[in-house]
Image (cartoon, rainbow, N blue to C red):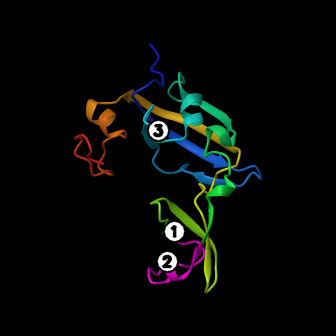
Amino acid sequence: MQVIVKKNSVVSLEYEIRNEQGIVIDSNKGFAPLEYVQGAAYIVAGLQQALEGRGINESSKITLPPTIAYGLYDDTLVYQLPAKEYLHTGFANVDDIIQLPDGREAIVVSANKDSLTADANHPLAGQTLFYEVTIKNIRDAIPEEITCGHPLSAAINCSGLPGCC
């Protein structure tokens, strides 16, 4: 019987992601596989859907439009903020990540002595992404992994108890 990706499987995945220009924007080729719990929202929804039912050593090319990847770009998530409110934090420069008054994080995209422009969109919002993936291993998640929403490993310090992460 073939082992397949299904809800609450721990999936080990080798991947490469390219943008619309064909530029590699992320990859773990040559490194340890990414492990995630299927259905736990650790990876983008579209990729989880595309991997459902696939088996070990299966390779796929998957195209994800923004709606099932990192979402559409939303102009209402770009904020003009007074620089004086952020200068004292030391995070008022372009590419700094700041916390907005509502608690969300945003990237500073422009700054001057009077104001900051901060973008709370995910950096990949609005982009179609092209994945090349190979499933390296699949196993059933243990209850603690299902509770935490990620595989338990030496790389993640997690007790496995509810609220541990």
Q: Examine the image and state in which quarter residue 153 appears.
A: top left
Disc 3 target residue: 41
Q: Nearer the viewer, residue 45 or 32?
A: 45
Report helix, strand or loop for mark 2.
Answer: loop
Looking at the image, is mark 2 or mark 3 nearer the viewer? 2
Q: In this picture, is 74 found above or below 114?
A: above
Residue 1 at least partly seen:
yes
Give residue 109's position: percent from left, percent from top: 64, 70
How would you rate the neighbour count of disc 3 (Cα within 10 Å): few for under 14, some for 14-19, many for 20 or more?
Answer: few
Kindly identify the amino acid type of the residue bearing the numbered disc 2: Phe
Q: Earlier in the sequence, mark 2 or mark 3?
A: 3
Q: In this picture, is 99 found above or below 11?
A: below
Q: Nearer the viewer, residue 37 or 108?
A: 108
Q: In this picture, is 70 found above or below 78?
A: above
Give residue 54's position: percent from left, percent from top: 54, 24
Residue range in magenta is 81-97
Cα distance, mark 3 to mark 1? 23 Å
Give residue 152's position: percent from left, percent from top: 30, 42
Kindly identify the amino acid type of the residue bearing the numbered disc 1: Ile
Q: Examine the image and state in which quarter residue 130 appears.
A: top right
Disc 1 target residue: 97
Give residue 84's position: percent from left, percent from top: 52, 83
Disc 2 target residue: 91
